Amino acid sequence: MNPSIVAALLPLLIIALIILVLCRKLPVRKEAVSAQALWPERKKARITMIVLGTISIAVAGSGIWYNVTALFTDFSGVTRQQDTPYFYPAFYVMSGLCLACYISLLTCGVQFLRSRMNLFRLFVGTVIFEVLYFFTISALWMVPRIGMSVAAATGVASGGLMFQGSILFPLWAPFVARWAVTQLPETESHAIGIGPPPRGGGPPTPPDERIAYPAGRLHRSESV
C-alpha cells in the first residue's frame, strides 16, 4: 500500500476511535424515558428519528464508499497536466476530514434508529462543520500558491458531500433533529442538555431503585 495513503488513514483511524470512545462515555441518565417506550404519544417523533437515521446512514455510507474508492485511484495524470504541486497533500487532508464527518454521521444515524437522541449535539456539530468546511475550501481556491492544487483535489476528495448536497441535507436535517428532541419527554430532553429540568423537583424514582421493605416489617406497620 502507498505510504501516503497509510499516512492519511492513520489520523482518520485515530479520529474515529476518539469519536467512538466519546460516544460510549456520553452520560445517559437512567431515569430518562426513551421515545420507544412512549410509542402512542411520540409516534411522529419516533418515525422522524427513524427516517432521519436512515438518511444519515445512507449519505454517510455513500460518502465513505466514494472516498475509499478515491483513495485507491491513481491521479498522477492530474499532477502532470496541471500545475498542482500540492494536489496529494490537499487530497489526503480533505479526504481524512470528509471521512471523519461521514463516520460521525453514521454513528449518529445508528443511534437515531435506536430512538436515542443522546448524540444530537454531535450530529448538529458535524453538519455545521461540513458547511464551514465547504466554504473554507472554496476560499482556499483563491490562495495563489495552493489554490490550483486545492481546486483540483476538491472534486475527488469532497465528492462524497454531493450525496448530502443533492437533498439539501445540511439545510433541514439539524432542524428536524431539533424538533424530534423537543417531542421527547422532559426527563430525556433535559438529560441530553436540550430542554429545561423536569417539573416537580425531578423525575420519579425508577421501580428498580425504590427501597424494598421486608414483608414482616410491612405487616408490623399495618398492625400498628
Image (cartoon, grey):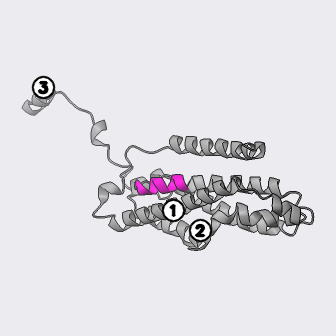
Left or right of residue 43: residue 4? right
Would you name the residue on which mark 1 appears?
58
Outermost residue, left side: 223
- 110 within the magenta span: yes
- Left or right: residue 126 versus residue 195 is right
Q: Secondary structure at mark 3?
A: helix
Q: Which of the pair 133/85 is nearer the observer? A: 85
Residue on which disc 2 sits: 163
Can you say whether 205 is above or below 33 in the image? above
Where does the N terminus fall, quadrant-wise? top right
Name the spot of residue 166 as percent of width and height, x first: 59, 74
Q: Residue at x 88, y 61 (%)?
A: 80
x and y, in percent, of residue 38 in the image: 30, 58
- In the displayed structure image, the side of residue 85 where residue 93 appears, left or right: left
The quadrant of the rendering that contains the C terminus is top left
| Cα gap from disc 2 to disc 3, whole angstroms | 66 Å
**SS class, disc 1:** helix
Front tag of 2 and 3: 2
- Asked if residue 142 is positioned above or below residue 192 in the image, the reply reads below
Label 1: few (<14), some (14–19) or many (≥20) C-alpha neighbours in 10 Å: some
Q: Which corner quadrant of the image does residue 206 belong to?
A: top left
Q: Residue at x 38, y 56 (%)?
A: 199
Q: Does 40 appear above or below 19?
A: below
Q: Are marks 2 and 1 in contact (CB under 8 Å)?
A: yes
User: Judging from the image, what secondary structure is the residue with disc 2 in?
Assistant: helix
